[in-house]
Amino acid sequence: MLDRALTNLKSAWREIAGGKEQEPHALDDGAVQKLRARIAECIEARGGEVSARARAAGIGQLYLGLNREGRERFLTVLAGEFDVEDAALDAALAACREAPDRAARLAAEERLRSVLVAPRVKLLTQFNALPQGVKFLVDMRADLLRMDLKQPHLASLDRDMKDLLTAWFDVGFLDMRAISWDSPAALLEKLIAYEAVHEIRSWADLRNRLDRDRRCYGFFHPRMPDEPLIFVEVALVKGLAGSVQALLDESAPVADPKDADTAIFYSISNTQNGLRGISFGSFLIKRVVDALAADLPQLKIFSTLSPIPGFRRWLDGALAADPELLPDAERAAIAERNADFADPSVLAQLLAEPGWQQDKALAEALHEPLERLCARYLTIQPKGRLLDPVARFHLGNGARIERLNWLGDVSAKGLKESAGLMVNYLYRREDIEENHEAYARDGTVAVSADIADLLAPWRGDKKSAPKLRVRGSRNPLRRIAG
Amino acid sequence: MLDRALTNLKSAWREIAGGKEQEPHALDDGAVQKLRARIAECIEARGGEVSARARAAGIGQLYLGLNREGRERFLTVLAGEFDVEDAALDAALAACREAPDRAARLAAEERLRSVLVAPRVKLLTQFNALPQGVKFLVDMRADLLRMDLKQPHLASLDRDMKDLLTAWFDVGFLDMRAISWDSPAALLEKLIAYEAVHEIRSWADLRNRLDRDRRCYGFFHPRMPDEPLIFVEVALVKGLAGSVQALLDESAPVADPKDADTAIFYSISNTQNGLRGISFGSFLIKRVVDALAADLPQLKIFSTLSPIPGFRRWLDGALAADPELLPDAERAAIAERNADFADPSVLAQLLAEPGWQQDKALAEALHEPLERLCARYLTIQPKGRLLDPVARFHLGNGARIERLNWLGDVSAKGLKESAGLMVNYLYRREDIEENHEAYARDGTVAVSADIADLLAPWRGDKKSAPKLRVRGSRNPLRRIAG
Amino acid sequence: MLDRALTNLKSAWREIAGGKEQEPHALDDGAVQKLRARIAECIEARGGEVSARARAAGIGQLYLGLNREGRERFLTVLAGEFDVEDAALDAALAACREAPDRAARLAAEERLRSVLVAPRVKLLTQFNALPQGVKFLVDMRADLLRMDLKQPHLASLDRDMKDLLTAWFDVGFLDMRAISWDSPAALLEKLIAYEAVHEIRSWADLRNRLDRDRRCYGFFHPRMPDEPLIFVEVALVKGLAGSVQALLDESAPVADPKDADTAIFYSISNTQNGLRGISFGSFLIKRVVDALAADLPQLKIFSTLSPIPGFRRWLDGALAADPELLPDAERAAIAERNADFADPSVLAQLLAEPGWQQDKALAEALHEPLERLCARYLTIQPKGRLLDPVARFHLGNGARIERLNWLGDVSAKGLKESAGLMVNYLYRREDIEENHEAYARDGTVAVSADIADLLAPWRGDKKSAPKLRVRGSRNPLRRIAG
Amino acid sequence: MLDRALTNLKSAWREIAGGKEQEPHALDDGAVQKLRARIAECIEARGGEVSARARAAGIGQLYLGLNREGRERFLTVLAGEFDVEDAALDAALAACREAPDRAARLAAEERLRSVLVAPRVKLLTQFNALPQGVKFLVDMRADLLRMDLKQPHLASLDRDMKDLLTAWFDVGFLDMRAISWDSPAALLEKLIAYEAVHEIRSWADLRNRLDRDRRCYGFFHPRMPDEPLIFVEVALVKGLAGSVQALLDESAPVADPKDADTAIFYSISNTQNGLRGISFGSFLIKRVVDALAADLPQLKIFSTLSPIPGFRRWLDGALAADPELLPDAERAAIAERNADFADPSVLAQLLAEPGWQQDKALAEALHEPLERLCARYLTIQPKGRLLDPVARFHLGNGARIERLNWLGDVSAKGLKESAGLMVNYLYRREDIEENHEAYARDGTVAVSADIADLLAPWRGDKKSAPKLRVRGSRNPLRRIAG
């Protein structure tokens, strides 16, 4: 679907540098030789900055015409041959060491600073003056990230790229834009391609996600206006939503957004591999909450409906290691309901059966133990950090774990990853800073009273008790008590 | 006229940080104490990145509320107390020196790199997430540039700001936009305020400069959309224009741009003091030439009509030092026409007389000697570089000196600065790279045959002969021959 | 200032029809002959509708090239020779009369309807397919309105044009747009040119009228996007404004619009002579009130500050006809204060003295009598309608006369037209319909209690008592009581 | 798919008039009573024009809430009770008749003119001031067109609506806009819904029609910006395209538009039933040709690839009436190839067999006779006009019949309607006027030499010979000769 975008990019560059379309090809020794010379010319800006940028376009076009192997060779050249020069660095270090006075020392530091910038950084910057040059660099880094970054020169090229992209993609430069059914089809098809959480199956599915009771927002870079960097899908509903299938049901009636009291963030997708490690998510959530609150003042609750991608994997491992993982009371409760489940390690086997969730009695018996185990999974920090990446993201942003949702995602993926469980992370504007602060200080996790109840079996245990910050009253309708 | 802009900026920031409008005030010791703590909080990003950016807004607002003295104190704090830490730097240098193996050395270099970034850079970056945050930083640097940059900490703060602004204002991020009489009045009044070459005297003057036979283009930053960073004014005419007064004559008839064969760049103004040292001019000229050539394919000549700001100052000094500055032939020629002028040092006195240019005989007699001297001024490089800043800019861009224009600017300023002379720098697309290259290599200056003729008296002299690259045929109408 | 617009219009048309620019010229007999043929071709749409519209462009260009005399001849041809055909009309009338049955009668009516549309209407419509064709027709009607419309054919051409323009300029097609200092200068210079109430003296004056505490809105036609059809200037203030000089004072401090409780409509200008008789004013006021109320919910009062253009003329005539015009009490009061004024007819003389308003005692003595007379002028309807055109407009829209403002406009024009008096017409949304209804029914005029008090002397008189609808309580600060 | 649009329309209107959503319902007697009164109030503009327009919104909302039966009743009331008043008309006619002099006659005509405008026209106009009011009237007319227009009052209501819409939708008010994959999805889904010639089967199909080698243009009304009134799909190819399946093949490679020499208009769809009888097609084609020629100057040929919707129906009837329809030579030729086909009336039977076109021998044998018959069908004018509506449209616009395409449309629809044949109508800009003129004068049809050849058998026959205007040379590759 995005081939066209690539085609456009290539053709835009070709227009500048005036070449002909070709099949992707490798980079032979002769070409490497020439490449070296051209890169050097750009870096020295021979013929002036303006001409150098034009030459950089030629190099960019060359790169776009390469196949995978060719690109790796290109990047290897750039990494190995245009890195910081050891001799120059040693000299600068020596000058620092030997500086006779403050002034000399300052000058030496200045020199050191400049020597530490690899010459290739100039070339990387020059790509920016070209149409779609920003996107070019992002994609080039995506190529690089597929290579072996344990090699020091490649790692150091990656650092150069990441530094440059970090400056260019500072959140202050990004535009937050609403994406709707009135957005260009060329943009919307990118949502379909990039959606990473709950696959968009068709244009009808997409339209449903952009209906009157939905919102979608993305961050855009001024030089990549047709490409969202990250986007979030929001449902406007009454009360916390607990089932993603209900949200994505195309046949469900469209609600009046004026009646909603809750905004559910049910999908957040980063789109650019080349921006790995440069984070926008927390800013996007903050700004979307602000925008929604301004637009629909009756909204009172801002929460996610999130997957728990690592739960099953952890559970299987944990059960294998410790068949008594469950608290005694839980085990007894399961046994009482169904003698077959007396051994909690049987859980793994049960969950491996396709369709277990449709067996009402079975599902009923598993409900409470699984929620307890899931709450456990979400809050323990065996190596000093949370296990679940989604939990890390939202708790790091100052949200709290508000509610687990039994059979919240009964898609194949949902069952496989998290036994069908989903979780709401709640963003209360007045708590965000303190939650963040507590979490950053010592890993204290903000949870609702209900979640704290689920964790009751472990809270007595000095060694393994999770550090909790309990907020909010119990949900009167919750079945599972502490 | 731009007070309103400042008012808006302040009020935008106040809305974020929620303060009250006040008179500009100083910064007392208590406030400095608090400021330190707040800056530290931002730098440590306590409460998360999102909160830290909100806090940075508060600091920004504080800054905007300060008077000049207060701002200088603020900047002094930022410069002195949040600079690179000497101890950390020393440790990193030691680690580099003592690294036992390659891996340790690489890690130490990484550490060194990070230590060399002053902590305040984080705060400076955080300003960017705020409305008009980019403009804020530009203006803050303008404030800093008024201080004494010989102090190392201030110089180093300036370097941090300049580095940041250099990344943010990379030419690749800038939009070139045409500015016309259909542009917002709020933008046009900025042209009036910022025009630096030929003052815009009124809205009628401005309208004349934006008429059908004129063009105006500027570079804009996506985060400062109402503020040109640099703009150039262009007249579409037949043949090289030689008189700026003719171009600015509001009563002159409007020509049909389709009949023009020449685009005259008669004014280029940088607008932001805070971007000193970050250059866009050559890129703007290149892109305007491209845009005009695409739009009006019949345009054949792209040239400036430029002031020669330092000519008179140099001339006076030169005549004082060497009354025989003029070649013998010239001196003889002057003497022949008017015995009073036999002594060329009398030039300075003559030019000091108001209205000398209206005395036809006098003007006639001065015409040739002054053009020769001016050509000399524009091409000598006593300390290895050209004397005239405008010449340095255009010749550095690959233009050539095409023609001197006698009485081309008879405004008070024009007479005072350059004895009424103006110069055309010609941009021929096919020569630009080589001109630049020759100039960059050894200071060779590209000139037309006419200019070379003017320089004939000095070309024989081995020691002081200018290095010339002569291009183009002689203008058949030129009176002054070699 | 608007010459450029005309030039553009002409050149746009010339591009279509491919002609050459010429001096405006007359229309000789030969040209009339050809014109006739070309009009006929267009009307018959020979070569198809598409070609006919292209031909109409040629005719339009011809028209634009004519001088005043030529245009009058053109319009005379169009009026006299392409009107409804008498013979056809007579036949259609006869067919109606003699129709044997209902079906025949209906067919005859249909025929009659079609015969009543003059053939030239087709040509007038065809102008619309051309760039700026709408503006062309508006301007052509403006030309026509300068001719003698007592001639039946010209009157009937005017009716055709007006009917067409009425359909094209239906208020439903118009866009209301805010005009601000961010609007294109090319649009803003039209405000300067078109302002009809209080002349805009300079760009600085204009900018003051578009400052943060001001608003300006206009109606635009989609085919004349650069040309407001009507615009209104609004000041956001605290309490009713009474002095237009205070509003236009460029040196007055700018207020925060959030503090305003009152929107003052101080100038409404129609811009297109060619749209005479097609009224947008009441719709514009309604929509501006709605827009302001939505934008600034704290606004409570919507009122004009209006001129009283016919007051002095009426007063002079009235005093001449009836020196006892003033009620006895008033006359006595004047006499008591200054014996010289015992004869009210002396008023006219006094007001003719330049600077009378600066003589405090005199002004004081005139204050009450003039306000009474002015209230009288604004409310009597000698020939079944109000005398003052501005009053007719606002009272017809459902406003009420709220307050007279002594020395509200001390410009030369204000003194000359209305002895410096201004009036506030108040728009209360909840009263508009009933006010309008009462006024439409029998001329009942809505007034405030204060205005009613001013009219007290006449209210007892059965014959000449104004029909009033008194609303609102008295202003406690008013000096003049009933 | 367009339900949403209707929902939006209803809700926009509800917001104005403040009602509640309900099920579509009928209109009972009481409601009719009230409706009458409300219509009358609007027409009399009681409370002023502004209020009347607000009331019209209420009536509009009422209408939108009605079911089909209710709407018909509403329209019947509007047609029967607010039509031209007979008495007033009679009086006006009498006044015309009895006018004693020219002035009285003119006044009487004026009165007549005004009486002939039904009072309801005012209400219809008032709908226009409302959001989406233009679309409302278009849809209301679509409702009316489903009723029995033989009833005089309904016919006369339709005439009023059509007159109003004709003025509002004058081609001069329409914007031509390019539609592309960058257009809003909400607009693109309307193409899918409205495409009337070759169904758009999916978003992938649509994207293929908007690819780099395609163009799509539509006319839009400024008050219906999200709704194309008519749109045309264009393919940029080399040489005349003959097969619509080839054009719509999603797997075909995308060509470079710069290599194309021909623009093929392969689908034109009107979208608004309510605009029946108001034609934009010829203007759209003209403007698209102009736009393409300006954009891609290398395009030399502008042609349609059109269906022949009535061919098979005509053929079946014609064969039934006259089994010898085919010229003798053709019959002989068929017989020679296959004795079974000796009787040309067998054609109908053959074509009725599904899959006949896949039988190569059969298809081969039918090729020539069917092309001849089709050429015949496209050019005869039994009742003074062409039989095929598509032919009427394009020949009326000045195109010529250029080429028949054997098996040009092998979709079920194509086979059923036109035995798989398609036709190219060629638009040569230099011929358009004359072609149109000849066709308008006496029905002369412009054809290529090849088409003339196909018609050879009939050209000798004085009575039935088609009037042809033959242009262009023969295609050397054509198999069928005259």
Image: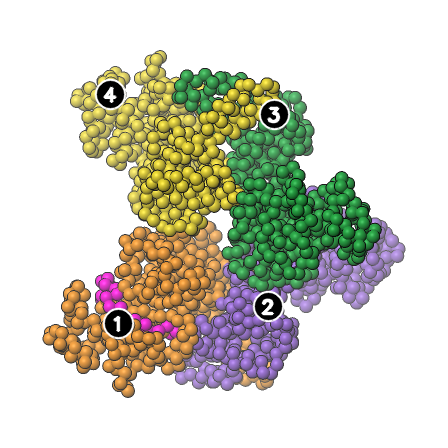
Chain colours: A purple, B orange, C yellow, D green
Q: State the CA–CA distance, disc 1 to disc 4.
A: 80 Å
Q: Which amino acid does label 2 sit on?
A: Asp
Furthest toward the left, the residue is B339
Q: State the CA–CA distance, disc 2 to disc 3.
A: 68 Å
Q: State the CA–CA distance, disc 3 to disc 1.
A: 86 Å
Rendered position, B102 above or below B390: below
Q: Is mark 3 on a helix, strand or loop?
A: helix
| Neighbours of disc 4 within 10 Å: few (<14), some (14-19), many (20+) | some
Q: Dividing the image into 4 quarters, which one contains the C terminus of chain C?
A: top left
The disc label shown at residue D153, or none: 3
Q: What element carries label 2?
A: helix
Marks 2/3 same chain: no
| Neighbours of disc 2 within 10 Å: few (<14), some (14-19), many (20+) | some
Q: Which amino acid does label 3 sit on?
A: His
The residue that label 1 is drawn on is B478
Q: Is residue A436 toward the left or the right of residue C11 in the image?
A: right
Q: Is residue D173 toward the left or the right of residue B7 in the image?
A: right
Can the viewer see residue A15? Answer: yes
Which chain letter matches label 4? C
The disc label shown at residue C319, or none: 4
Q: Which residue is drawn at 29% across and 78% down?
A: B452
